[in-house]
C-alpha cells in the first residue's frame, strides 16, 4: 500500500484549486502550513473564514467591503462627480495604488460576453444607472479592460449613459490591448487616466 495521509492529500487538493497553483506548489504550501506553529495555522484558517463571512459588495459601488459602504464611498473628500467604471474589485486596488485618482468607482463584476452567457443582467449595470440618476455625477470613465469583451461593455454602457447628458470618457494610451488593468503599473494607469478621451 502506498504512503498516504488523507488530511494532507485533502489540504493539497484544496490548494490546487487556487488559480495558478499546480500540484508541486500545492504540496509546498501544504507542507509549509504543517511546519508552522499551530497558532499560525489557526490564524491563517481564521483569516480565510473571516474574509469569506464578512466581505460583501458595497451597497453603493459594488466593490468589496466589510462595512455597508466601502472606504471610498464613505470618504467625503472624494470627488462624487466622477465615476470610474471597472470590471473587477481588483481594478479598484490597481487604481488606488496610483494615488492619482480622487473620484468614485463602480464595479461591474465582469464584462459582456454572450458566448459565456454574460449579458447586461449578469452585471451591476442597473446599480450604475441608479447612481447616475441624482444629477451628482458629471463624468463616467470607462475603465473596462482592453479586450473584446471590455470594449463591447464600454460601448454598450456609453450608449446608455450619453443620453443622460453626462461626459463619457475612455482610458487613453498606455494600457496594452488585451491586457488586464490589475497587471498595469501605477505610472501606466496614471497616464491612461490623464489622457482619457471622450467617447
Image: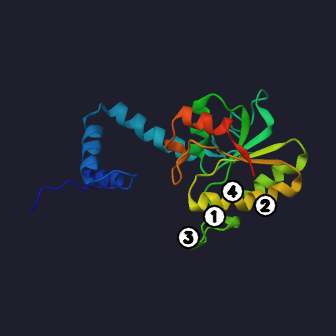
Is 47 rendered above or below residue 100? below
- Density class for disc 1 (Cα within 10 Å; few <14, some 14-19, many ≥20) is many
Looking at the image, residue 2 lies above or below residue 133: below
Q: Where is mark 4, residue-wise?
A: 154
- Helix, strand or loop for disc 3: helix
Q: Residues within 10 Å of mark 2 (few under 14, many from 20)?
A: few
Q: Position of residue 6 (x, y in %)?
A: 24, 56
Quadrant of residue 114 within the rendered picture: bottom right
Label 1: which secondary element? loop
Q: CA distance from mark 2 to mark 4?
A: 9 Å
Q: Give the CA separation, mark 3 to mark 4.
A: 18 Å
Q: Hey, which quadrant is residue 196 in on the image?
A: top right
Q: In this orientation, does residue 59 appear?
A: no
- Residue appearing at x 70%, y 34% in the figure: 72
Between the C-alphas of marks 1 and 3, the distance is 9 Å
Mark 4 element type = helix
**Mark 2 sits on what residue?**
159
Question: Which of pointers 1 and 4 lies earlier in the amino acid sequence?
Answer: 1
Residue 32 visible somewhere in the drawing = yes
Q: Which residue is mark 1?
A: 112
- Residue at left offset 70%, top offset 65%: 120
Q: In this orientation, which residue lies closer to the viewer: 73 or 184?
A: 184
Nearer to the camera, 93 or 173: 173
For this view, does 107 lie left or right of residue 181? right
Q: Which label belongs to residue 116?
A: 3
Across and down, in percent, residue 46 comes to 46, 39
Amino acid at each position: 500500500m502506498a504512503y498516504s495521509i488523507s488530511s494532507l492529500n485533502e489540504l493539497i487538493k484544496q490548494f490546487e484549486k487556487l488559480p495558478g497553483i499546480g500540484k508541486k506548489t500545492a504540496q509546498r504550501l501544504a507542507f509549509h502550513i504543517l511546519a508552522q506553529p499551530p497558532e499560525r495555522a489557526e490564524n491563517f484558517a481564521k483569516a480565510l473564514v473571516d474574509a469569506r463571512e464578512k466581505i460583501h459588495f458595497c451597497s453603493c459601488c459594488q466593490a468589496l467591503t466589510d462595512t455597508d459602504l466601502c472606504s471610498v464611498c464613505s470618504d467625503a473628500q472624494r470627488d462624487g462627480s466622477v465615476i470610474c467604471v471597472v470590471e473587477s474589485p481588483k481594478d479598484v486596488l490597481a487604481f488606488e495604488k496610483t494615488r492619482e485618482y480622487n473620484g468614485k468607482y463602480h464595479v461591474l463584476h465582469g464584462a459582456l460576453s454572450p458566448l459565456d452567457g454574460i449579458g447586461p443582467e449578469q452585471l451591476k449595470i442597473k446599480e450604475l444607472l441608479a447612481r447616475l440618476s441624482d444629477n451628482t455625477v458629471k463624468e463616467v470613465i470607462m475603465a473596462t479592460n482592453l479586450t473584446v469583451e471590455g470594449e463591447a461593455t464600454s460601448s454598450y454602457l456609453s450608449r446608455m449613459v450619453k443620453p443622460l447628458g453626462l461626459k463619457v470618457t475612455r482610458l487613453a494610451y498606455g494600457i496594452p490591448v488585451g491586457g488586464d488593468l490589475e497587471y498595469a503599473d501605477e505610472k501606466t494607469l496614471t497616464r491612461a487616466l490623464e489622457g482619457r478621451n471622450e467617447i
